[in-house]
Amino acid sequence: MVATGLRGRGGVALWVRVVVCMVVGCVALAVCLASAGMAAASAWSIQRTPNPAGARYSVLSGVSCASRTACTAVGYFANGAGVGMPLAERWNGTSWSIQRTPAPAGARSSLLFGVSCASRRACVAVGSVTNRSGITVPLAERWNGSSWSIQRTPTPTRANGRGVSYLGGVSCASRKACTAVGFSGNSAGTTGVTLAERWNGSSWAIQRTPHPTGARVSFLSGVSCASPRFCIAAGFFVNSAGGGVTLAERWNGTRWAIQPTPTREAATYVQLVGVSCASPTSCTAAGFFSIVTGIEVMLAERWNAADWAIQRTLYPDHARFVRFAGVSCASPTSCTAVGFFNNVPGIDVTLAERWNGTRWAIQRSPNPAGATSNSLGAVSCPATTRCTAVGGFTNRAGTGVTLAERYS
């Protein structure tokens, strides 16, 4: 969130550098965020999405569907001057169109990473903004059915040289109850803690989140709220040995608490990137882990109201690196996870897998013709047979552009 769907196979340290690069507005991130998704039984299809005029690159990093005919996707683009700008697009059941999104005056960079829509007329998007002083702080914008407006969000008190705070994921249980999560730390991403903020219908407030014992740095990448009193946030932390470890925290309406999560054997680092709760007793988190050889493998874990357990996922044929970047559960027995994998020719292609209550199965998903890199970074399923996934791809001209795919 994430910081989600990011490439780079050098371990947690590289991931952290990419995240920090993203939140401070690095134009080069376009190359890192091109890629695709996957789908079920040949039923995924590519949708035509617009790109801002004159954009050097553009990508969609989050999506939320209030219904089958109302989806909102957010991300960012680099304008002609190379400045990162917020991007929002809306699906009306027929086509995608760009919405006008404000950017803070004088900002060096404004990026949106995640979005949640409680209804067609109520959406909240979160991300980061780098101000004139070069300090990166949280950004939140709200859709009221006719326009987007910037919301005032608090910034954590900095200490020990901290200079980056961002919100990477958001979930709204209702119009008056939204929770956003992210990170607050130094600009190098080597020290820092998890961040959570809550919207009560009138203002945002920082919530206290626990820091894993012995952790050097910790991140929350995604969050899902089944009700105003039940949220699960997922991410990872770097332990004292320098390894990446899964992290899950639960909100019970009063406070956040860390939940024990299993880690794959022989994994050198592990990250949970997205999470989705169909109910307070059924949540699925998705991400990836790396083994000592550097190979990356997708990861799914499931919460059954008592504990988390690793699920068996299917590894695509002829794949070298595989990542899940987002997940959405329409019901306890219907979840879809998306991301990308690197095939034998060395091209990143879209990935989608579906959980039917018993097992995960790979779905066939298309890739744009002539694309050199494809990735799906987020997915939203308003029904068990309807999903929308978004991300980006690199076209024949070498430009990063938006990507949306629909399962129906």
Image (tube, rainbow, N blue to C red):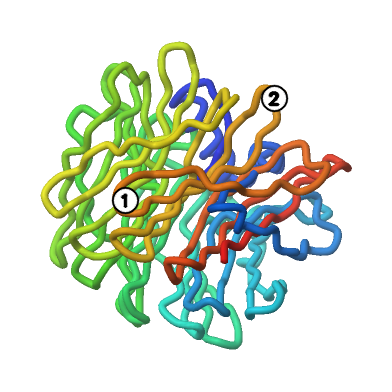
Residue extending farthest to the right is 397
Residue extending farthest to the front is 41
| Horizontal and vertical percent position of residue 2 | 48, 47
- Identify the image quadrant of the C terminus: bottom right
Dividing the picture into quadrants, the one containing residue 196 is bottom left
- Helix, strand or loop at label 2? It is loop
Amino acid type, mark 1: Thr
Amino acid type, mark 2: Gly
Which is more toward the observer, 358 or 348?
358
Disc sitting over residue 235 in the figure: none
Q: Which residue is mark 1?
A: 284
Q: Is residue 33 above or below residue 94?
A: above
Dividing the picture into quadrants, the one containing residue 390 is bottom right
Looking at the image, residue 141 sits to the left or right of residue 59; the answer is left
Q: Residue at x 70, y 58 (%)?
A: 46
| Horizontal and vertical percent position of residue 147 | 60, 83
Dividing the picture into quadrants, the one containing residue 159 is top left
Alpha carbons under labels 1 and 2: distance apart = 30 Å
| Horizontal and vertical percent position of residue 229 | 19, 69
| Horizontal and vertical percent position of residue 401 | 75, 52
Disc sitting over residue 346 in the figure: 2
Q: Residue at x 64, y 80 (%)?
A: 92
Looking at the image, residue 394 sits to the left or right of residue 362; the answer is right
For label 2, count other residues whose C-alpha is less than 10 Å away and answer few (under 14), some (14-19) or many (20+).
Answer: few
Q: Residue at x 88, y 42 (%)?
A: 397
- Helix, strand or loop at label 1? It is strand
